[in-house]
Image (cartoon, helix red, strand yellow):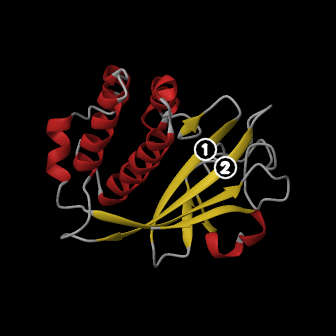
Amino acid sequence: KKLGEQQIQGLFGELFVLDEYLKKANKSLVNPIISSWKGLYDTANDFEFDQKNVEVKTKKESVLFVNISSEFQLEKPSNKSLELLVVSVKLDLIDGKSVYEMLLKILELIRLNLGDMSILYQSLNQKGLTLENLKQYNNYRFIVTKTESFDAGNDNFPKLSISNIDSEISNLKYNLRVTQLGEYLIKTKNY
């Protein structure tokens, strides 16, 4: 099944975050970082580490909100913190990178650090993705302009999650306005 633009944009954001984590990692952490990426396994959060979970949302830089697609995405895990990491991108067919190019970059980092590439291939396989079939999306090319991390585990963080809605309510989808989350901001990085 062919992925739509929103799915490609979301995958690009997750791969960008994985690449950023791998660039900072020493060799002994490469495999655990690759294993922490759960975005293609239909789990609640995109990255699951020992101390925190990270939910990655990718949006066009001009859009003021991110889409939350279930009441589980911003549910704080017990004994861990939860971070909402918003990746702002712009479409750029000349200078932008495709998901295929991001994947090649990540595979090179894994190879240089003697990591296990099969962990990444297994993740891609969850959605039937391969290096070869990702080439068909090369017409979607993005440049990351900014990343913002928010403390989504804070009790006052504005969210609808399983712990703060009635049990009769399910299958929630809603927009969260990023521009209103300043008091929960952990870190901003411009690119």
Q: Quadrant of the C terminus?
A: bottom left
- Percent from the top left, x then y, of residue 53? 64, 39
Residue 118 higher or lower than 34, as above or below: above
The answer to whether one can see residue 7 in this image is: yes
Q: Are marks 1 and 2 in contact (CB under 8 Å)?
A: yes
Q: Report crowding for label 1: few under 14, some 14 to 19, many 20 or more residues within 10 A (C-alpha).
A: many
- Asked whether 115 or 112 is in front, the reply is 112
- Which label was assigned to residue 54? 1
Mark 2 belongs to which amino acid?
Glu
Q: Residue at image x 24%, y 61%?
A: 140
Q: Report crowding for label 2: few under 14, some 14 to 19, many 20 or more residues within 10 A (C-alpha).
A: many
- Where residue 86 sits, quadrant-wise, is bottom right
Residue 1 higher or lower than 13, as above or below: above
Mark 1 belongs to which amino acid?
Val
The answer to whether one can see residue 75 in this image is: no
Q: Quadrant of the N terminus?
A: top left
Residue 115 higher or lower than 45, as above or below: above
- Percent from the top left, x then y, of residue 88? 47, 67
- Percent from the top left, x then y, of residue 61? 45, 74
- Asked whether 50 or 135 is in front, the reply is 50
Reading the image, the residue beneath label 2 is: 83
- Where residue 167 sits, quadrant-wise, is top right
